[in-house]
Structures are given as C-alpha cells and as structure tokens.
Image (cartoon, helix red, strand yellow):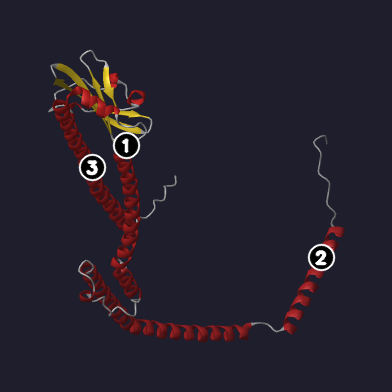
Amino acid sequence: MFSKRTERRSIASQLILLFTLATALLLASGLGVFYWLVVRHAFAEDNAVLADKISALSADLHESGPNIFAEELKGRHAGEQTVYWIRMLDSQGRTYAETPGMDRSLPPEIFPLPQKSESAVRSLKDYRTGAKLFSLVALSEESGGQAYTIQVAQDRSSDERIERNFAFLFIIVLSGSVLASGFIAVTVTKRGLRPLGEMTRSVGRIGPTHLKERVTPADWPRELQPLATAFDDMLKRLDDSFTRLSQFSADLAHELRTPIANMMGEAQVALSRTIIMSRSVAAAMGRFMPTPTCSSALLQTCSTTRCASRRRTVQFKSRFPTTKPISKSQ
C-alpha cells in the first residue's frame, strides 16, 4: 500500500500568502469603512437638503397661499433637469397642482402617508422607475382653512451614479493594492530569507576534513543565532567523535601489530619444518622402492610359476579321473 507523497510546505510561499491576505483584509476593511462613511454622509446630506426643501415649501404655502403656490408649480417647463418633483393635493385627494410630467412617472398612490413637516423625512420611501431613483415624502399642511397634501420626490439618481462609480473605484484600488502588496511581500520575503541561503552555502563547505570550521553565530540575524549555535555545538561533538575514533584506530593498530607479527613468524617456522620433513620422508621412501628391471623380472617369475601350476593340475586330473556318484537303486 503506497502512501501519498505530501508536498513540502514553503516558508516563503506561506509568508507571501499570509502577508498578502492580511494586507488585502486591512485594505478591504479600511476602504469599506471609508465607502460606508461617504455613502452615509451623502445620504444624510440629501436628507438634510430634502428637509430644508420641505420647510421652504411649507413656508411658501403659508405665505403665498395655495393659488400662487400652484402657479409656481405649473410655471416649470417640462423636460428641464428637475431635482425635486412636487404635487399638491386637496382635501379630497385630487391633484390641485403638480410639476409638469410628474403624473407619468410618479403617480400619487406610490407616496407614503402624509406626515407633519417635522417628521416627514423620517418616513422617507425610496422608489425606482427605470434608471432613476427617487426619495418620496408626503406632508400635510393647512392654508386658508383648507387641508392640503404636498408630495415631494427628490431625484437621487446622480448620487447613485456617484456611489456606483465610487464602488468601482474601490474595487480597482483594492485589486491594485493586493497586487502591490503581493509584489512587496515577495521582495521582503526574499530579502528576509537571504541569510538562510547564505547559511546553507556556509554549511555546505563543511566536510569531514573541515570540522574545525564554525558558522559564527554573531554574524547572523537574531532569529538564526540559536540555529548557528546549535550547529556549532554539533560540529564540536562530531570533531571530538572523529578524534576519539582516530585515536582508537591508532591504538588498536599498535596493540595488534606485535601479536600478528609473532603469529606470522611461528607460521613461517612451522611451514619450513613441514617442508623439510616432507622432503626427508620422500628421500627415505625412495631407498626402498624397486627399480624397473627388478619389477619386470619379478613379474616374469610370477607368470612362469602360475603356468607351471596349471600344467600340474591338468596332469593330475588326467591320471585320476573323477568317479560317478552311486545311485540309491544299486
């Protein structure tokens, strides 16, 4: 069963990733808070302007009366860039006067219930039609003994476009900042880990014949000094071990040199004696061994004796033939 080979973690990649993520988080938080403050400030400013507009309309209605107020509303030309759309309803809910073209995009029924001028902004209602965004408010007023309802719509489309552009700029700034922070993280990490590479090259020069060299902790940054000290201690222990091993080898060779020499001398003496004894035995055996002529004569004599014995046996059998055995019937 084969185990999965796990990828080794890189300190540099982890530092770059953590630094980039931390920077992105801080930038996103800072820019997000800044965006929220800007939008909130713009919203509060629009509400303040709308409240001033409502107060001005209420004062104008009380001072000039409903007829002059209605003439002022009808006097605006349709198609002009209008920020405020105003409609005045009588006590029966019928349109008394309004900004030209308001009935096409802002019917009366979409507005909230009328409130007093002091609390009208609190009941603000947002309404979207097409690409435009309106803030709707309604207030109840009296003029000449008659009750009137004034409906005001504030066009906030330009503010929404500004907020959208600001959000797009926010994303661009955040993306550029993240890329810049990643580049800075790579540069800082490489510069910060440079002493490790130098220590690696310094340690790579140390071998069995250079155990006297040291890394010198004082020359390294504070974070690497404990590592350099531990490595120097290890080199010292290795040097002491190599020294003791070399001394032991020398002592062992000295102690074994004399016994081995004595054993070799005794072996050579025994070997020379064995050679001398074998030669003496061979010489002694050579005196008693028959010569080739004597051996031939001996063999011829034995052959002659064997032939004579055979002839005597044949003559004996011819003179005394063998008798037949006596049967039981005789």
Mark 2 to mark 3 CA distance (whole Å): 146 Å
Give the x, y percent position of residue 180. 33, 58
Counting residues from the start of the chain, the first of labels 1 and 2 encountered is: 1
For residue 108, above or below residue 210: above
Q: Residue at x 29, y 21 (%)?
A: 110
The residue beneath circle 3 is 36
- Check the picture and name the quadrant holding the N terminus: top left
Counting residues from the start of the chain, the first of labels 2 and 3 encountered is: 3
The residue beneath circle 1 is 157
- In the image, what residue type sits under mark 3? Trp
The residue beneath circle 2 is 310
Q: Quadrant of residue 91?
A: top left
- In the image, what residue type sits under mark 2? Arg
Q: Quadrant of residue 292?
A: bottom right
Q: Residue furthest top?
A: 92
Give the x, y percent position of residue 220. 24, 73
